[in-house]
């Protein structure tokens, strides 16, 4: 009886661990159709209009000067109906730069 309880406890612990890891891995996955958007420095970082497509098309990360004082660029999905600006709720990567 004691072996059965121990076995059930181990199975439950493994199941909890597997479920927890699957949710953790899901938060790190990428979205579809992300682009790079460069922060212009004009306006708040929370305003999508403060960003432009990096390198003209958003397909590559812009060169960001060394430093970690302000936001340089974000990788995110474009807004629906306005592909020139990011949907800031879908950011998967952020690059920082020296303040300009």
Image: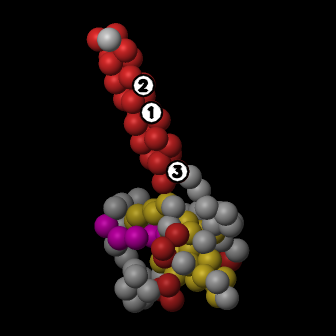
Q: Secondary structure at mark 3?
A: helix
**Rounded to the nearest whole Å, what is the CA distance between mark 3 and mark 2?**
23 Å
Q: Are marks 2 and 1 in contact (CB under 8 Å)?
A: yes
Quick check: 40 above or below 70? below
- Quarter holding the N terminus is top left
| Label 3 CA crowd tier, 10 Å (few <14, some 14–19, many 20+) | few
Residue 82 lies in quadrant: bottom right
- Quarter holding the C terminus is bottom left
Report the label total. Answer: 3
Q: Earlier in the sequence, mark 3 or mark 2?
A: 2
Look at 63% across and 66% down and name the residue there.
34
In magenta segment, residue 72:
yes
Q: Which residue position holds label 1?
A: 15
* Foreground disc of the pair 3, 2: 2
| Magenta span: chief secondary structure | strand
Q: Which residue position holds label 3?
A: 26
- Relative to 70, 85 lies left or right: right
Residue 24 placement (x, y as % from top left): 45, 47
Q: Earlier in the sequence, mark 3 or mark 1?
A: 1
In magenta segment, residue 76:
no
Residue 49 placement (x, y as % from top left): 51, 89
**Rounded to the nearest whole Å, what is the CA distance between mark 2 and mark 1?**
6 Å
Look at 40% across and 89% down and name the residue there.
43
**Rounded to the nearest whole Å, what is the CA distance between mark 3 and mark 1?**
17 Å
Report if residue 96 is visible in the image. Answer: yes
Quick check: 29 above or below 67? above
Q: Which mark is residue 11?
A: 2
The boundaries of the magenta stretch are 69-73
């Amino acid at each position: 009886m004691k072996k059965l309880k121990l076995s059930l406890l181990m199975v439950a612990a493994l199941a909890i661990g597997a479920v927890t890891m699957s949710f953790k891995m899901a938060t790190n996955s990428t979205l579809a159709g992300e682009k790079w958007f460069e922060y212009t420095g004009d306006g708040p970082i929370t305003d999508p209009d403060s960003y432009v497509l990096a390198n003209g098309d958003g397909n590559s990360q812009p060169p960001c000067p060394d430093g970690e004082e302000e936001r340089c660029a974000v990788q995110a999905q474009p807004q629906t109906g306005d592909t020139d600006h990011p949907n800031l709720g879908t950011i998967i990567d952020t690059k920082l730069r020296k303040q300009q």
